[in-house]
Image (cartoon, rainbow, N blue to C red):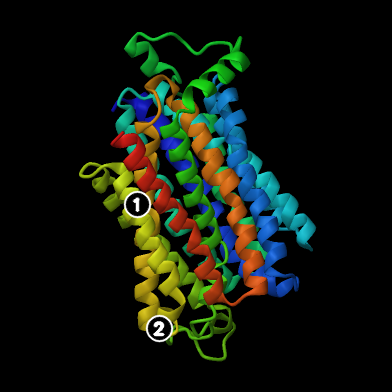
């Protein structure tokens, strides 16, 4: 990999890690907001869902803009906007400001995936390696973002923590302003044409969309939506749910029992971060699985496992700390193993020249519409027990499993 490619990959990796650091630090903060502002889980769930929805909904327009303007500039704007949103969050005195800050985050976070993936594809000669490193950085953000947030909350107020989380975005923006790379280097190497001016892009968008929505792709997209609903529905309130099954004040002797640090130590948040860390291994296993069996069959198997885990999660958690840790680890492993499978499924049912647009719709379904899962879970937790909420949420992967079987039987075998 040459210097230009390394510069681009480093830039996009940093941005990807920051996007997911912010994304999964939010559920950690939800626990505090629920107690500090005396609001229902339904209210907080809706507030969070709006921000997450904008994260996905903005993918399509961001993708169109990435075809017309500098992708480096777009990623830089996205980073600056995400930093500004957490700066706004740091001065929030009520849920209205929190809602505004999360909405701002969602808008600017939506820039990253279409712009960065486009930048890698046009600027990095070894684009496959670039995509791999980009994905690994996202996984690190998913795993360590909540861990860092939880650790800072031991010593600082949540508003101070929100302000401190602005620092990574500032560092990334500083690097972007000094980084020098050719966005179109790989296109030039391949003999391709430079990025166009976007003329006729609206009509092309409509025509390409009509061609894209075959039976197979439509089924695959609905399957992705089921994943998004379950992903948001379970993860948004999971730190709060885990807090019901662990002794939050317990600090394993790390701090003096009566100290402020012991009072702030939240074991549930660290268990949540550990669950997400195990998810990295799940993603690796899911990627290997895509090379060995039909992706639709793999989706059906993983969705079925999620049904079982969702139904069994609370009964197992109630058995004690050991079973809770085990079921959490297995849940994190299986939940994240589905990502490579649905990404491969989208690729299998979309034409190569429509791959960018297909992933735009994928992010719209998974992150955008799927964000409704946070609001649904918040409502369910307000009117039903945790156990019943998980049982109802199990209907989502059950639907995904059925659709995956249909995809395999009707399209693959048809």
> Which picture quadrant has residue 94?
bottom right
| Figure quadrant of residue 130 | top left
In this view, 64 is above or below 229 = above
Q: Residue at image x 34%, y 55%?
A: 302
Q: Which mark is residue 212?
A: none
- Within 10 Å of the Cα at label 2, are there few (<14), some (14-19), or many (20+) other Cα atoms? some
User: Which quadrant would the C terminus be assigned to in this image?
Assistant: top left
Write down the residue under mark 2.
321
Query: Could you tell me residue 222's position as x and y percent?
Result: 49, 43
Front position in the image: 338 or 132: 338
Q: Secondary structure under badge 1?
A: helix
Query: Residue placed at 52% from the left, 39% from the top?
Result: 363
Label 1: few (<14), some (14–19) or many (≥20) C-alpha neighbours in 10 Å: many
Q: Residue 91 appears at what percent x and percent y?
A: 75, 58
Q: Earlier in the sequence, mark 1 or mark 2?
A: 1
Tell me the number on the disc at residue 300.
Answer: 1
- Percent coordinates x, y for residue 206 in the rendering: 58, 20
| The N terminus - image quarter | top left
Badge 1 vs badge 2, beta-carbon distance below 8 Å: no
Furthest residue to the left? 292
> Can you say whether 26 is above or below 320 in the image?
above
Disc 2 secondary structure class: helix
Q: Answer with the quarter of the image where residue 164 lies.
A: bottom right
Q: Nearer the viewer, residue 284 or 115?
A: 284
- Vertical placement of residue 313 versus 16, above or below: below
């Amino acid at each position: 990999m040459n210097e230009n490619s390394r510069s681009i990959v480093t830039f996009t990796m940093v941005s990807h890690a920051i996007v997911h650091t912010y994304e999964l630090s939010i559920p950690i903060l939800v626990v505090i907001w629920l107690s500090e502002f005396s609001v229902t889980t339904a209210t907080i769930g809706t507030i969070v869902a709006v921000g997450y929805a904008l994260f996905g909904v903005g993918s399509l327009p961001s993708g169109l803009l990435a075809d017309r303007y500098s992708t480096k500039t777009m990623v830089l704007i996205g980073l600056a906007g995400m930093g500004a949103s957490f700066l706004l969050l740091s001065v929030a005195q009520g849920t209205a400001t929190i809602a505004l800050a999360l909405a701002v985050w969602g808008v600017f976070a939506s820039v990253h995936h279409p712009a960065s993936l486009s930048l890698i594809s046009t600027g990095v000669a070894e684009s496959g390696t670039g995509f791999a490193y980009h994905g690994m950085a996202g996984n690190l953000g998913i795993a360590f973002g909540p861990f860092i947030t939880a650790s800072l909350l031991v010593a600082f107020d949540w508003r101070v923590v929100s302000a401190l989380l602005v620092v990574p975005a500032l560092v990334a923006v500083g690097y972007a302003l000094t980084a020098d790379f050719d966005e179109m280097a790989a296109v030039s190497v391949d003999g391709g044409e430079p990025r166009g001016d976007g003329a006729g892009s609206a009509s092309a968008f409509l025509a390409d969309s009509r061609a894209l929505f075959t039976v197979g792709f439509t089924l695959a997209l609905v399957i992705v939506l089921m994943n998004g609903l379950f992903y948001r529905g379970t993860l948004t309130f999971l730190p709060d749910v885990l807090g019901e099954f662990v002794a939050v004040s317990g600090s394993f002797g790390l701090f003096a029992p009566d100290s402020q640090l012991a009072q702030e130590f939240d074991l549930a948040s660290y268990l949540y971060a550990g669950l997400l860390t195990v998810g990295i291994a799940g993603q690796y296993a899911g990627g290997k699985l895509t090379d060995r069996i039909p992706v639709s069959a793999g989706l059906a198997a993983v969705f079925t496992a999620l049904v079982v885990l969702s139904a069994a999660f609370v009964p197992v958690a109630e058995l004690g700390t050991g079973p809770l840790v085990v079921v959490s680890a297995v849940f994190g492993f299986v939940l994240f193993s589905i990502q490579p499978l649905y990404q491969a499924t989208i690729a299998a049912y979309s034409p190569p020249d429509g791959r960018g647009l297909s992933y735009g719709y994928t992010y719209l379904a998974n992150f955008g519409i799927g964000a409704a899962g946070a609001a649904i879970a918040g409502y369910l937790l307000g009117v039903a027990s945790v156990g019943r909420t998980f049982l109802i949420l199990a209907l989502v992967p059950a639907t995904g499993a059925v659709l995956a079987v249909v995809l395999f039987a009707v399209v693959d075998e048809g």
